[in-house]
Image: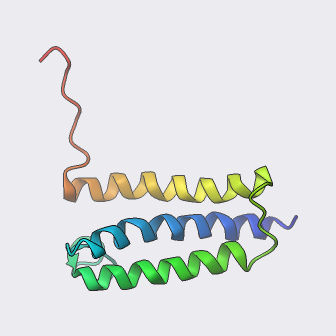
Amino acid sequence: MPWLDYVAWFFGGAFLANAVPHFVVGISGRPFQSPFARPPGQGLSSSTVNVAWSLVNLVIGYLLVLRVGEFDLRDTGDVVALGLGIAVLAFATARRFGRFNGGNAPLSNPKD
């Protein structure tokens, strides 16, 4: 199995993971950060822009996962590559956008 297939599937997972928040927020009618906002990645884009960006991410994820190599859900290596892409992007964006949306608030001390 060429290692470039695993790289493509890793990035495919990242694009698929990125599609989820933009789609959910967009179809909910709320603005959200996107690369098209001012400043990029920090300002808010409209719900329509977020749905469009989500669909672009879905297409790119599809192309990278199902059109590069022979991705097989029953092959552990294939799934690990995809899952790592999903996990890396999910944790990175949770930390990055948590500061804008209140998701990085420290946990309260149980003794409080």
Residue 59 located left or right of residue 49: right
Q: Is residue 40 above or below residue 111?
A: below
Count the marks: how many?
0
* Residue drawn at 30 percent across, 85 percent down: 49
* Residue drawn at 49 percent across, 78 percent down: 57
x, y percentage for residue 101? Answer: 20, 57
Q: Residue furthest left?
A: 112
Q: In which quadrant of the rendered image does the C terminus lie?
A: top left
Figure quadrant of residue 64 = bottom right
x, y percentage for residue 55? Answer: 45, 82
Figure quadrant of residue 52 = bottom left
* Residue drawn at 32 percent across, 79 percent down: 50
Figure quadrant of residue 11 = bottom right
* Most foreground residue, 74 or 112: 74
x, y percentage for residue 109? Answer: 19, 22
x, y percentage for residue 94? Answer: 36, 53
- Model colouring: rainbow
